[in-house]
Amino acid sequence: MITSTLNLLTTLSTDFSTNLLPMFDAVAWPNAPFSPPDSESRGWVSYDVLLGESLQVETGGVNQKRFRTRGLVQIMVFTRPETGEAIGIAGADTVADHYRAATISGISFEAPSVETVGLSGGWWTTRIRCPFYADRVA
């Protein structure tokens, strides 16, 4: 069960750091300084949590009202151009497999999507969107 928005964001970033970060040369975290690695890099990712609407899903009694927040973990995989899609897609598949139908500390994930974005800022880009919902009782 999630206790706050900060708890939700911290839980998600800790899970990513522990389980997926070692695959990539660098990560661009939200609102943190970042410079992409040099052109010899295997690739890097940007990590974002996009929070959506929250709504009450159970009325319950005192301190038993359940509120649900929906959102997306969005990972952008950046690989060198003109090296084919395999590296980016392999990284995207690993991320998608990690989140597919997973439950992480009370955060429930649904089916992720993998999309080729194409060339962006000099890097070949693949986007993974992992929808989730998390409940909070108040």
Image: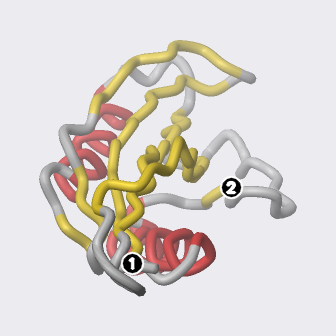
Q: Nearer the viewer, residue 56 or 38?
A: 56
Q: CA distance from mark 1 to mark 2?
A: 32 Å
Judging by the rendered image, the residue that carries numbered circle 1 is 137
Q: Secondary structure at mark 2?
A: strand
Front-lying residue, 72 or 62: 62
Q: Position of residue 65 (x, y in %)?
A: 37, 72
Residue type at mark 2? Ala
Q: Position of residue 19 (x, y in %)?
A: 33, 73
Which residue sits at x=39%, y=62%?
A: 23
Residue at the (39%, 37%) spot, across then down? 129
Residue for point 30% across, 51% down: 95
Tell me the quadrant of the picture where the N terminus can be found: bottom left
Q: Earlier in the sequence, mark 1 or mark 2?
A: 2
Q: Amino acid at mark 1?
A: Val
Q: In the image, residue 118 lies at what x, y percent?
A: 52, 13
Q: Position of residue 59 (x, y in %)?
A: 32, 64
Q: Which residue is mark 2?
A: 28
